Structure formats: C-alpha cells, structure tokens
Image (tube, grey):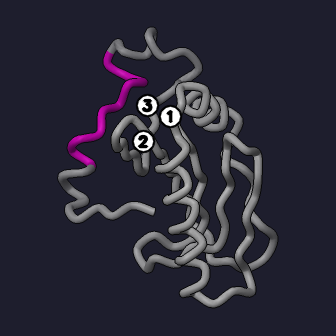
Amino acid sequence: MADVRNWASFIRGRWDWTRFGYEAGFPRGCQFTDVDAVVEFDGRALMIEGKQWDGEGDRPDKPSTGQMLYLKYEVEAGKTVLVLFGCGCCNNPWAVYDVGRDEWFDWRGLELADRRTRLKHHIDRAMEIAK
C-alpha cells in the first residue's frame, strides 16, 4: 500500500544489506523493514501497517511471524498498532487487526462510507488511549 510518487528515487534510496560485506551483521539474510505509518501526538502513538486486500475471499492471515514479533514489540513500547487491510490508494478499508488487543474487525458487507467511519473510530480511539 505504497504511495510512491517517484519510483526511481525510491529504488535508489534502498540499501542492500545482504552484500558488500554488510551480510555478517544481518544473520539469516534479515533486512530492514519499512513502517507504513506512525504518528505521535501529545505522547500518544499510533502505528499502522498496511496490507493490500480487495475484500474478496477468506480474510488474510496476520502478518508473518517476524513482522508480528516487531509489531508486538511496538505495542509493548506503548504504541497502538493496527494492521489495516484494504486499498490504500483508493482509501478503501476492508478489515483491521488490532495487535495489542489481538482482535479482528472485518467490515465486509458494509458500505464504503461506513468502513471509513469505523477506521476513523479506531484511529481516534488509539490517539485517545495510547500512552
């Protein structure tokens, strides 16, 4: 769910940490992860990990084990962490997984405006209670 306006600049800015002698510091070929969205306001923090999904078929699984470990680490650090499933460029949310609460919110069958309102509710709640 990237909003990359200049792909050439984006690619040039990515580092390959698995070559050129760096690989010894990154066991098992680990790479840096990107964080899709983080906002901090008045000591409250919200992190959103976006995942592409068109709302069809079975609900997607949670992120991979390694990514979930990191997301849970962010929860333990005091952030509210949401995994948002949908289409980012068209502002079309289909489901949210709240990592800290270990709770799914599946919005299939609801109108787009209602899904957007529910996402806004999760964001508002996070910014009120995350410490």
Q: Nearer the viewer, mark 3 or mark 1?
A: 1
Q: Which residue is mark 1?
A: 131
Residue 63 screen position, x and y as percent:
66, 47
Task: Please give left or right for residue 88 compared with residue 117 in the image.
Answer: left
Residue situated in front as seen by the camera: 8 or 113: 113
In the image, what residue type sits under mark 2? Asp
Question: SS class of the residue under badge 3?
Answer: loop
**Residue range of the region highlighted in magenta in the rendering:** 11-20
In the image, what residue type sits under mark 1? Lys
Q: Main secondary structure of the magenta part?
A: loop
Q: Which residue is mark 2?
A: 34
Contact? badges 3 and 2 (CB < 8 Å) = yes
Q: Which residue is mark 3?
A: 32
Residue situated in front as seen by the camera: 28 or 83: 83
Earlier in the chain: of badge 3 and badge 1, it is 3
Residue 65 magenta-highlighted: no
Q: Residue at x 50, y 34 (%)?
A: 131
Residues at marks 3 and 1, CA–CA distance in whole angstroms = 26 Å
